[in-house]
Amino acid sequence: MHTVTAENPLQHLDDWDDYVASRYKEGKAEEEFRNYDAEANPGVAEFYRVNHANQTFDFVLEKRKEYLGLTRGKKSIWEAADYLNTLVDDSDPDTDLTQIEHLLQTSEAIRKDGHPRWMILAGLIHDLGKTLCLYGEPQWAVVGDTFPVGCAYSDQIVFPEYFAANPDSKVPEYQTKYGIYKPNCGLDNVYLSWGHDEYIYQVAKPYLPEPALYMLRYHSFYPAHKHGAYKHLMTAHDEEMFDWVRKFNPYDLYSKGAAKPNLKELKPFYDDLIAEYFPEKIDW
């Protein structure tokens, strides 16, 4: 299989989150806009170079087959979060927060603003799919803006020039507006690049209401929910549900600077919330 190497070009996995948060910072003055070319952001640019070269239609099908049978064992939500905590890099000078604390910052910001309980829970679990890294997947197959495969690439995808190295760019069927899809076929019938969004969506699918599932599945689909790309593949229902994705997105991006949450104090609330929607252990 065609593979471009340099599997983990980001110094830390959270570098991608920081990059996206700054890219979409709301209300910033024009002079604050950062330069997002390859020279200004070599680690991020290298990440997207590898991501865009390797996220082929066949690769996506292969990873869906590998992971979406949910055969990695049963874990509770807290066990999955504890597992994700092992991703914390002690050498990172910029944060001493654990992955659980990052998730709690998101969910607590949602809770503070009075949103539904299921949305608070979506905030708590939205990044648990990053456990893919602990299964041995490289960064470019775990994080990054997601995009459809099997059809033409939108110029609203970050660093679109890097798709020239993707073998799918040479497949005529994949490079038309609709590609293998039909007009307004609905996103449930569209294959997006592989990553943590699809994985946590499939894990949570039996348990959460539809708006929460859209938040989980599409929170990294920035070309669509930030730039309006790929509407030709979406149904009216998809567009309606994307209002929830857009409502969720600021909490994902901008809660990181919030006060460090006290897990011991908050855990009883989240124990009750998790038990309201999930059984004790679920398939991963």
Image (spheres, rainbow, N blue to C red):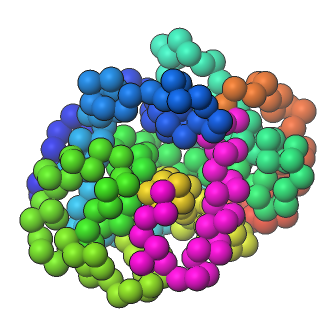
Q: Which residues are magenta?
A: 227-255
- Give me the residue at 20% from left, 53% from top: 163
The answer to whether residue 76 shows anywhere in this view is no
- Give me the residue at 76% from left, 45% from top: 107
Question: Is residue 2 placed above or below 203 in the rendered structure?
Answer: above
Question: Is residue 156 placed above or below 238 in the rendered structure?
Answer: above
Q: Position of residue 157 (x, y in %)?
A: 36, 53
Check if residue 247 falls in the magenta segment.
yes
Residue ranking furthest to the front: 30
Q: Position of residue 101 (x, y in %)?
A: 70, 32
Q: Position of residue 200 (x, y in %)?
A: 55, 59
- Give me the residue at 58% from left, 48% from top: 128
Residue 280, image quadrant: bottom right
Question: Is residue 30 placed above or below 166 in the rendered structure?
Answer: above
Which quarter of the image is occupied by the C terminus? bottom right
The answer to whether residue 7 shows anywhere in this view is yes
Residue 106, image quadrant: top right
Check if residue 115 falls in the magenta segment.
no
Q: Position of residue 246 (x, y in %)?
A: 64, 57
Q: Nearer the viewer, residue 117 or 264?
A: 117
Which quarter of the image is occupied by the N terminus? bottom left
> Would you say 225 lies left or right of 246 here?
left
Residue 212, image quadrant: bottom right
